[in-house]
Amino acid sequence: MTNSIDEIEDTDCILVVGSNTTSQHPLIAAKIMRAKQKGAKLLVVDPRTIPLTEYCDLFLKIKPGSNIALINGMINVLIQEGLIDENFIGVRTEGFEELKERVQSYPLQRVSEITGISSELVAEAARIYGKAEKAMIFYAMGVTQHTTGTDQVKAMANLAMVTGNIGRPGTGVNPLRGQNNVQGACDMGALPNVLPGYKAVSSADDRTRFGAKWGVTLSEAPGLTVVEMTNAAAMGDLKGMFIVGENPMVCDPDINHVREALQALEFLVVQDIFLTETGRLAHIVLPACSFAEKDGTFTNTDRRIQRVRKAVAPPGEAKPDWEIIAGIARRMGAMGFDYGSSREIMGEIAAMTPSYAGVSYERLDAGEVIQWPCTGPDHPGTPILHKDSFTRGKGKFFVVDYTPAVELPDKEYPYILTTGRLPFHFHGGTMTRRIERLDREVHTGFVELHPGDANHLNVRDGETVRLISRRGEICVPAKVSTVTEPGVIFVPMHFAECAANVLTDTHLDEDAKIPPLKVCAVRVEKHIGANL
C-alpha cells in the first residue's frame, strides 16, 4: 500500500476493484464501513454481488477482465469534465499528453459495450472519484490474476495520478495482499528477478554486495516464476523443487498439469505445518511451525513490520522455517548459515536492505510502529509513500489498452469461470478445513449459476453439474443465484476434491508472469447421477 490502513476512515472516496474485502480482509473492510458511516463515498467494481455492494454508493458489475476499459473510460470523463489535478500532473508527472490522446478512444458507449456497465454509471463513478478531495483505491487478486494484470494496476495508478490522489493522507493505490507476509516475503527477495529490498539481479553492484556477504557469485539471470517452474518440471528441465508453505495441488492453475510436473521431478521436498495434497507427492516432508510456535516478523499490506513471538512449543519434530533451511544449508557445506536466532537474521536484513535499515527487534519490542522504508535507527518509518516525489523522480503515465482475455467463451465452452475465496476458508483450505466449525459453514465447493443459465441448462438449485474446461473437469452442486451475471459462473478455490484450479488457464501476464485465475472458458453440463 502507498498509504496506511488507519487513513481509511478519514478519506472522502473509496474505490474497491476486484476485492471481496469483507471475506478476505475483514479488518480493512471494517475501516471502509466506518469511513462510509462518516460520509465517504464507496464505489465497488466486481463481477459478483458481494457484501460491500449492499452499502456502496455505486456498484459497477463488470465483465471479468475488462477493468482497463473501465478505468480508461473514467479518466476520459475526468479530462473532459475538468476534474483532473493539472498542478499535480504538471509538477509531479510525465507522459500525460500521450495518456490523454489514448483515453479518447474509450468513449462511454464503447466502455459500456466492453464492460457491461451502463454509460451513466461509468460517468457517475468518474465524477464521484474526481470530485473527492481525498480518494483511495483498493484492489486485490481480481485485478492482478489476469494476463493483463500488470496493465490493470498501471491503469489504476494513472487514475490516481491524474487526480493528484498520491502522496497525501487518505489517498493512494493500495493493494490488499492475498496471504499474510506476502509483502514481507517479497521484500526479502522471494521473487525470481530481485534480491532483498527489490534490488534487481541485473545490477552488478547489488550482486557483488550481496554475493560478498553470502560468499557466493550470484547470477544476473532472473529465475523462474511458479507456473514457469511447473512447465520446466514437466519438460524435464527442472529436476527438483523445495516447496515451503504452499500447496500448488490446490492453488495453482491446471492442477492436472501440476500433478504431472511434480511427479516428473527427481526430488520433491515439501515443508509445511500439515500434510497437504502436494506433500503427499513429496519424497521428503519436513514439519514446520505455525506462526504461534516461532519468533520473527510479518510485514503486512501497508508495509508495517509486526513482531511475532513464540506462544507455544512446536509439536513433535516441527521446527521454524529458518532453522530447517539453515540446517540443510550447513549440511550442504554452505557458509554463513550459523544463525543462533531470528533476531540475528533481522540484524542481517537491516544491514543489507536499505528500506529495513532502521528495523530492529529492540524497536519493535518497545512498541514502535514501523513501516518501511525505515532507513536508519532514528528514522520513524514511512506511513505514506511518494509524498514529495516518486522513486523514479516524476511519476510516469503508462498508456495501456484493453485486451480481451486469452480464453473467452465460444460455442464449445460458452461460460466465463471466475474463482475466488469465501469468508469461512483461507486460500487452499489447508488450515481452515481442519476447523470443524468453519467446515460446517461450507463443507465443499459449489458453482454460482445465474437463474437464467440454470433454466437454460434445466438445473435446479442443489443439483450436481459438471464443469468442463480445456484442461479438466469437476463436479459440484449448483447454487442458483443472481450473485453473478448471465454467462458468468463462480467457483471457490478452497476445495481439493472439486478444485476450481483443475479448470483454470495457464497463460501468463507478460510482465508479472501471473496466470489468469479470474477468467477462463468452461462448459456446464447437468450431471446424471447422485448429487454431491
Image (cartoon, rainbow, N blue to C red):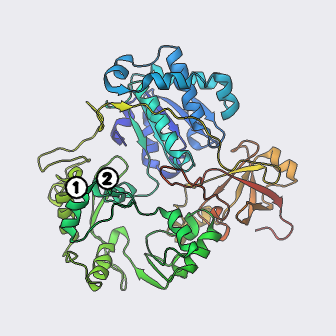
Front-lying residue, 472 or 123: 472
Q: What number of labels is visible?
A: 2
Residue name at image x 55 percent, y 55 percent:
423
Question: Is residue 52 toward the left or the right of residue 184 in the image?
Answer: right
Q: Quarter holding the N terminus? A: top left
The image quadrant of residue 296 is bottom left
Residue name at image x 26 percent, y 56 percent:
204
Residue 198 bears which disc, if any? 2
Residue name at image x 70 percent, y 30 percent:
113
Q: Quarter holding the C terminus? A: bottom right
- Type of the residue with mark 1: Asp
The image quadrant of residue 133 is top left
Q: Between marks 2 and 1, how big is the CA–CA gap?
A: 13 Å
Question: Is residue 427 toward the left or the right of residue 497 in the image?
Answer: left
Residue 290 point in image, percent of width and height: 38, 71
Which structural element holds mark 2?
Answer: helix
Position above or below: 191 against 22 = below
Residue 80 point in image, percent of width and height: 53, 15
Mark 2 or mark 1: which is in front?
A: 1
- Type of the residue with mark 2: Tyr
Q: Name the residue beneath numbered marker 1.
A: 205
Which structural element holds mark 1?
Answer: helix
Q: Residues within 10 Å of mark 1 (few under 14, many from 20)?
A: few
Q: Residues within 10 Å of mark 2 (few under 14, many from 20)?
A: some
Front-lying residue, 68 or 380: 68
Front-lying residue, 62 or 388: 388
Closer to the chain start, of discs 2 and 1, is 2
Q: Is residue 180 visible?
A: yes
Q: Is residue 436 visible?
A: no
